[in-house]
Amino acid sequence: MPSADPVSEGLFAKGAPQRFHRLIGLAGSDPSGVRRRAVVTSAVSWVPVFVLTAVGAAFSWNSGLAPFASDVALHVRTLLATPLLIVAETLCGARLAIIAGQFLRSGLVSEDEEPRFDAAVTSTLRLRDSWLTEIAVVLSAYAVTFVLIGASIETPVWQQAGAGPTPRYSPAGWWEALVSTPILLALIFGWFWRLFLWTRFLWLVSRTNLKLVATHPDLTAGLGFVGYSLRAFSPVALAFGAIVAAKAADGVLNHGAAIYAFRHSVLGLVAVVLVLFCAPLLVFTGKLLDCWRNGVFQYGAAAASMGRELERKWLAGERVERAPFDAPDFSTTTDLYSIVEKVYDMKLVPLDLKGVLAIVFATLAPFVPLVLVALPFDVIADKLTGLLR
């Protein structure tokens, strides 16, 4: 029986809360279907809030449209982060499926281990399409929403109806609390679940008898392609960065907070994102450590043996009839030593440095407009000049 193909199965391109989207007529994982889901979901999150706020302003039920228009965090969450998390399902999911299929195409999984690989794919599909997962994601989103509603967090003015020490939610405020926020949280929790499935899949694959090559030029025994997953997660990191940057922008633009006050939040966000998307790759550390240890012993012994033979042949006696460095023995030894050097330089985690930088840049990109708005141009110029000195 042929092995299951993660690419044809769309192994990570689907998942919670996609089944809920199908229930409300937003099915489709093709590019046009994804764009339709992104646009409709974003519109459901933002348009009713705008309409209800405008109606309330017309009848003096709330403080008017000005506070609503200045709520940067709301607009970024609903008009940018929400559709981006949906579009990322196709962008990121398709790339993860290709990476998963590469285990077979590269020959890392032998024919004897293909049934275990198929079992990993099948169990991942079963968990991905589970109704319980969909229900858990939606319930978790509403549970967190109700916690936020009950917490003593300052409610934006445009969400309030009337004044007083405990103002009531306006219709627009209730829609944002019971529809817009749960939609965003469900998408975020769906990505957490997809990340769990990715980690679990890699762990199951790491338990098979992989045909690793200690001398592989990627310095990770042939697993270097797995590190490209970091680049695939860049759209998700961009959405997370946009959410936090929008909250910081609201504090800076609407409440007079200093941009430096959010530096710890930014650093914490980058750390969390790196841990989330880099940690799954640690499942191969044990395999890579064994491969490195065996390679060091075997290739190290071969290098030592050739080195001793070279010294015995060319350095023990006196050979003056020709220059020893012109002999093929030296080029052969050099070739072997360059191979052995790759073994000694092996990395124990298949991290891709460019992928790490892509994740960091994607996370920080939404903060660039805020910095340009919050800091005067002369301050930015002085900072850049100081860096160049």
Image (spheres, rainbow, N blue to C red):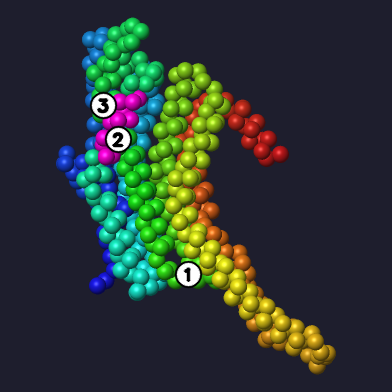
Q: Could you tell which of marks 2 and 3 lies nearer the N-terminus?
A: 2
The residue under label 2 is 140
The answer to whether residue 145 is magenta is: yes
Magenta range: 136-148
User: What residue sits right under mark 1 in the picture?
Assistant: 212
Considering depth in this image, is 12 or 275 the residue closer to the camera?
275
For the point 26% across and 44% down, which residue is it? 133
For residue 87, what is the image quadrant?
A: top left
Q: Earlier in the sequence, mark 3 or mark 1?
A: 3
- Residue drawn at x 37%, y 59% is 204
Q: Nearer the viewer, mark 2 or mark 3?
A: 2
Coordinates of residue 341 in the picture (x, y in percent):
63, 69
- Taking the image as drawn, is residue 37 in sight? no
Identified by mark 3, the residue type is Leu
Which residue is rendered at x = 27% and y = 55% of the image?
125
Our reading of the magenta stretch's main secondary structure is: helix
Q: Is residue 232 above or below residue 331?
A: above
